[in-house]
Structures are given as C-alpha cells and as structure tokens.
Image (cartoon, rainbow, N blue to C red):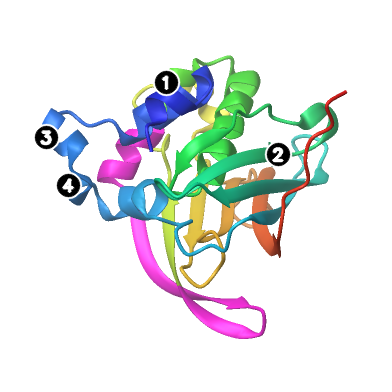
C-alpha cells in the first residue's frame, strides 16, 4: 500500500510519520519495525476478509471535559485482485463526519489511521498545538515505549486471543508543560486476527483530576459487525 499516494494531506502526514524511521533500510523492511508498529500499522488485517464487505464500528465519546456523543464508523472493502483491497471509509456522520479518500491498495485496516487522524485534529483543537508534533510523539512512542501484551477478548460468544498495544505519547515529553492537561492521555489498540478486519477496539482516555475519578475525556471505537455483499453506494446528488 503506497501511503504517499493514497491519503489526504493530514492522513498522508500521519501515515508517513507513524511508519517513518531514521534509516532507509529500516523504512523499507517491515521486519525491522517494533512489535507495536507491526501489529498496528503493518499487519495484513484485510487479506482474509470476504469481498465485498462493510466493517461496522461503534464510536462513543464520554467524560466531564466536553459533551459526549455516540456515533458510528463504516469501512467498505472490496478486493481488487492486486494488493488486497480498495477501501472507502465513513468515519462518523453528519457534522462530525471525517472526509476520507478512497484507498486503492490497502492491506492493513486504515480505520486505525482514520481514528488517529481525528484524534490529532482534536488535540490541535484542544491545545492549539501543531498536528505534526503530536504525530511525532505517537511515532516515537510506538517505536520505543509502547507496551504490548497478549490478552483475550469476548467476541460472538467466544474467547479469542488478542494483542493490546498501549501508548502514553506525551507523558515523558519535555515540552509537556505546553499542554499539561492532556499530557497523560493514554492510547490503547486491541487487535485480534479472529475479528473481521483485525481491529477489535481503539481507545483514548484522559485521566480525571484524581486517580479514583473516571476519565475526563474518553473515546472508544469498538467493532460491532460485518456486512457481506455490495457496500452501499454514495448518492450522486
């Protein structure tokens, strides 16, 4: 999947930064990525998915910092016989909808990049910081500090093996005083090969003022199902 050709400017910058490395050799060889990078960005999440299919996810925002809401995400996938799949996404709806381009050669599930793209836009809105700065922090933490553990999830009445990747991109940032209220934000990625599309849950959580307080702001996207057959076509109006 050539990320440099397929993503809109924000996602292009994010995808390039998240997989970027310090040496050309490492950048060209996924075997040199960290375990977290491979699980989140390089695994072929879509290759076993029946075509065409639509992956569905719930999205829930909650917490005391701002008003919450519930919405949905849909990823339409169809095999093109080349490098797995062509993907079109609808991330949230109405005025919250994130405009996304079609991706012609996807193997990893781009819903992860969509989730992070929206998150970085929210960090920019809330802190007035620069998006490329937050991208850099996520990338560096994914390479050097991410915690990966094997776990299990309950899915359709079964217990499935899964991997959980946890990041605290800003906790050790020397410049955290510029956005200290958000510096302890935690990112959690739950991946499971037994789930269609490979992504079970993505979550960000900003701790409350006290350790016993619920998150001040939490966003959770969870896989809810897959629809086989032709994806709904957008209106031409």
Instruction: Examine the image and state in which quarter residue 99 appears.
Output: top right
The residues bearing labels 1 and 4 have C-alpha atoms spaced at a distance of 24 Å
| Residue density around tag 1, few if under 14, some if 14–19, many if 20 or more, within 10 Å | few
Choose mark 1 or mark 3, whichever is in front. Answer: 3
Q: Is residue 146 visible?
A: no
The residues bearing labels 2 and 4 have C-alpha atoms spaced at a distance of 32 Å
The residues bearing labels 1 and 2 have C-alpha atoms spaced at a distance of 26 Å
**Image coords of residue 22 (percent x, y):** 17, 28
**Image coords of residue 109 (percent x, y):** 50, 49
**Image coords of residue 129 (percent x, y):** 52, 16
User: Could you tell me which secondary element the residue under label 2 belongs to?
Assistant: strand
Q: Which mark is residue 133?
A: 1
Check if mark 1's residue and mark 3's residue have beta carbons within 8 Å. Answer: no
Check if mark 4's residue and mark 3's residue have beta carbons within 8 Å. Answer: yes
Would you say residue 14 sits in the magenta stretch? no
Q: Which mark is residue 25?
A: 3
| Residue density around tag 2, few if under 14, some if 14–19, many if 20 or more, within 10 Å | some
Q: Which residue is mark 2?
A: 90
Q: Which residue is mark 4?
A: 32
Q: Above or below — where is 185 with respect to 178? A: below
Check if mark 2's residue and mark 3's residue have beta carbons within 8 Å. Answer: no
Of residues 65 and 12, the one nearer the viewer is 12
Would you say residue 138 sits in the magenta stretch? yes
User: Could you tell me which secondary element the residue under label 3 belongs to?
Assistant: helix
Of pointers 4 and 3, the one earlier in the residue sequence: 3
Q: Above or below — where is 153 with respect to 196? A: below
């Amino acid at each position: 999947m050539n990320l440099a050709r397929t993503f809109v400017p924000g996602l292009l910058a994010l995808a390039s930064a998240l997989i970027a490395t310090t040496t050309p050799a490492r950048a060209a060889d996924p075997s040199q990525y960290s375990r977290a990078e491979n699980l989140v960005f390089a695994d072929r999440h879509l290759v076993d998915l029946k075509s065409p299919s639509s992956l569905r996810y719930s999205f829930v925002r909650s917490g005391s910092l701002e008003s919450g809401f519930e919405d949905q995400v849909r990823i339409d996938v169809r095999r093109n016989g080349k490098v797995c799949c062509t993907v079109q996404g609808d991330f949230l709806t109405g005025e919250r909808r994130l405009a996304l381009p079609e991706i012609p050669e996807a193997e990893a599930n781009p819903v992860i990049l969509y989730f992070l793209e929206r998150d970085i836009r929210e960090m920019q809105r809330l802190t007035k910081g620069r998006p490329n700065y937050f991208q850099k922090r996520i990338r560096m933490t994914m390479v050097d500090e991410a915690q990966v553990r094997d776990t299990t999830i309950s899915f359709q009445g079964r217990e499935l093996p899964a991997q959980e990747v946890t990041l605290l991109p800003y906790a050790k940032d020397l410049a955290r005083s510029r956005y200290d209220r958000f510096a302890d934000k935690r990112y959690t990625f739950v991946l499971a090969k037994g789930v269609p599309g490979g992504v079970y849950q993505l979550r960000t959580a900003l701790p409350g003022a006290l350790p016993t307080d619920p998150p001040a702001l939490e966003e959770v996207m969870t896989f809810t199902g897959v629809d086989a057959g032709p994806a709904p076509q957008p209106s031409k109006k």
